[in-house]
Image: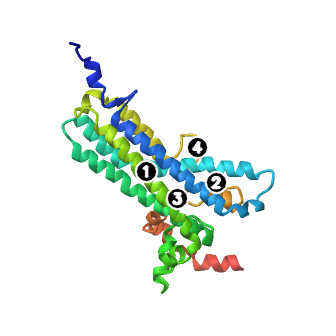
Amino acid sequence: MTRKSPDKDNTISRTGFWPGPLVFLWQLYLCIMLCFTIFRLLLLVQEFEAIQYLPAGEAPLLLLKSFLMGLRFDTVASGYLLVLPFLLLSASALIGSGTLLIRRVALWVAILPTLFAFFTCAANLPFFHHFYVQLNVSVFDSSGSGDSNFLWEMIFGEWRYYWGLAPLLLAAWLFISTGVRQFRRYLSADANQAKGASVWQFLAFAMLLFLGIWGRLPWQPNLTGSAAFSSGYGLPDQLGLNPFYTFVNSVAESFDPRKTGADFMDDEVAVRNVR
């Protein structure tokens, strides 16, 4: 009769160096990044004619910079989408006492907001084609202009834009299937995960998540929601942005009086400048 190795029991919930919960989150991150990149490629294909307005010798480099900058914006968006599932799974793993409900909640907390993020990417395709800017809070402006159905008519009223539903459904299927499959592998681990998890590993992952949400390394410039970078050409500047990031960022700024208010100069200064 062979005796089980204690190390084997203690590492059931681990995959390599990382504990099971962190491997699960890493798989979700890769899937989200892949889907965001697919939507960016589709946007480039949709606006392919605009490439002719770029300098012939600089176009490939400008587009490459857009996609590289897009990875930063996508990482920020992915970090925000995964931060709450990370906190829930960390608590579940470190407690290690039958927290199946917390894990299931973490799964759906990861899935539902991410599906909304994919929806914004799909809705951004017709929106960008009309306005040549990434999706933002202005989509709600039509509700106060007497035409509250403008946005939905723009997206769903033109059958030529229905092709955007295909990548949306594909991204949703890919993410849900990946999430559920990895989640089942995660649940098949030892219920007492604390034996296979290290607090320091969770802290290291938390640091990586923080850097992802911060969107830059100490020597890199801050990200802004108006353009990926300034090249002087509309398509490269906009292509690197993440529609979910620009939409959420613009909604948040709409509640900031400093961003929405109008600042007028003093009357005397205005008259003096005119003279």
Q: CA distance from mark 4 to mark 2?
A: 12 Å
Q: CA distance from mark 1 to mark 4?
A: 31 Å
Which residue sits at x=64%, y=51%? Answer: 66
- Residue indicated by mark 4: 220
- Identify the image quadrant of the N terminus: top left
Callout in the foreground (4, 2): 2
Q: Earlier in the sequence, mark 3 or mark 1?
A: 3
Give amino acid for label 3: Pro
Horizontal placement of 237 versus 134: left or right? right
Give amino acid for label 1: Phe
- Residue indicated by mark 1: 175
Horizontal placement of 9 versus 228: left or right? left
Q: Position of residue 119 (x, y in %)?
A: 46, 62
Q: Position of residue 51 (x, y in %)?
A: 73, 59
Q: CA distance from mark 3 to mark 1?
A: 12 Å
- Identify the image quadrant of the C terminus: bottom right
Q: Position of residue 178 (x, y in %)?
A: 41, 46
Callout in the foreground (3, 4): 3
Q: Earlier in the sequence, mark 3 or mark 4?
A: 3
Q: CA distance from mark 3 to mark 2?
A: 26 Å
Task: Between residue 224 and residue 185, name the one nearer to us.
Answer: 185
**Disc assigned to residue 167:** 3
